[in-house]
């Protein structure tokens, strides 16, 4: 079991108390591909952030690779086990595609070789853009850089928040195929939040978050 979430609850207190979900549980093994769907405002992104240790739940517990994700351990667990792909890419616009891919390893003070970064870019079909500043790339190309970056530190879990949300249908399908292919070829657990039903249908497990509950 690479991820085990038990009875997670989250309430926002401002401007007035609002419980976005309660008693949410999920288990994921290496190689699982999991889609979480639901209407806007149901708390999907918040749940993904909790899975990624970016914010804590109000109640419940999260285990990553068998370790409890306490506030003290969260950053280390995130560095060792989790890679993120965001809807808005979250890339460094003035840096090259290769620099962006290698950045997580540099932040972790265990820098990868440029050759390894090039291999990751080649895997997403973008090796020829390695020296291009990200600001010159298209949306689909930026998301491919983001996928390669997410794989940089060899995480166990890939978390993707609306990875095709900013793309047209053709590029959305391309990104979905690349994301699933990379997860499967590297034996990663993929958990993604999406409104894209075609992308959700590519995953081995599908859930819907609605009315504060996560259901198959």
Image (tube, rainbow, N blue to C red):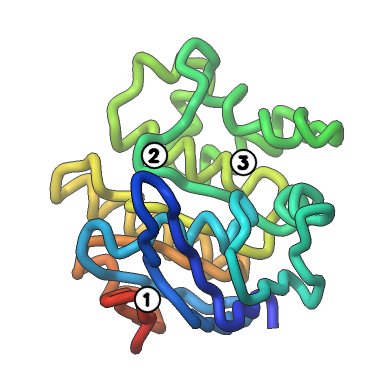
Residue drawn at x 66%, y 43% as measured from the top left:
152
- Where residue 83 appears, x then y in whole percent? 60, 51
133 sits to left or right of 158: left
At mark 2, the secondary structure is: helix
Tell me, yes or no, whether the two marked residues, 3 and 1, touch with CB atoms within 8 Å.
no
Tell which of 27 and 210 is nearer to you.
210
- Where residue 51 appears, x then y in whole percent? 57, 63
Q: Quick check: 59 above or below 28?
A: above
Q: Quick check: 126 above or below 151?
A: above
- Where residue 40 appears, x then y in whole percent? 22, 58
Separation of marks 1 and 2 at Cα, in angstroms: 19 Å
Quadrant including the N terminus: bottom right
Q: Which residue is mark 1?
A: 203
Residue 143 numbered mark, or none? 2
Tell me, yes or no, whether the two marked residues, 3 and 2, touch with CB atoms within 8 Å.
no
Outermost residue toward the front in this view: 16
Quadrant including the C terminus: bottom left
């Amino acid at each position: 079991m690479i991820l085990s979430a038990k009875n997670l609850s989250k309430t926002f207190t401002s401007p007035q108390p609002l419980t976005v979900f309660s008693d949410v549980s999920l288990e994921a093994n290496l190689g699982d591909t999991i889609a979480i769907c639901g209407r806007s405002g149901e708390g999907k992104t918040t749940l993904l952030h909790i899975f990624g240790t970016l914010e804590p739940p109000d109640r419940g517990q999260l285990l990553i690779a068998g370790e409890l994700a306490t506030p003290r351990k969260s950053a280390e667990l995130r560095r060792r086990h989790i890679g993120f792909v965001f809807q808005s890419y979250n890339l460094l616009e003035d840096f090259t595609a290769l620099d962006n891919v290698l950045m997580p390893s540099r932040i972790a003070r265990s820098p990868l070789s440029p050759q390894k970064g090039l291999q990751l870019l080649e895997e997403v079909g973008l090796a020829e853009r390695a020296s291009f500043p990200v600001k010159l790339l298209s949306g689909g190309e930026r998301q491919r850089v983001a996928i390669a970056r997410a794989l940089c530190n060899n995480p166990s879990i890939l978390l993707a928040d609306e990875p095709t949300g900013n793309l047209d249908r053709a590029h959305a399908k391309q990104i979905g195929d690349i994301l699933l292919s990379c997860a499967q070829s590297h034996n990663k657990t993929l958990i993604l939040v999406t409104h894209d039903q075609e992308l959700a249908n590519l995953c081995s497990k599908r859930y819907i978050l609605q009315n504060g509950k996560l259901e198959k």
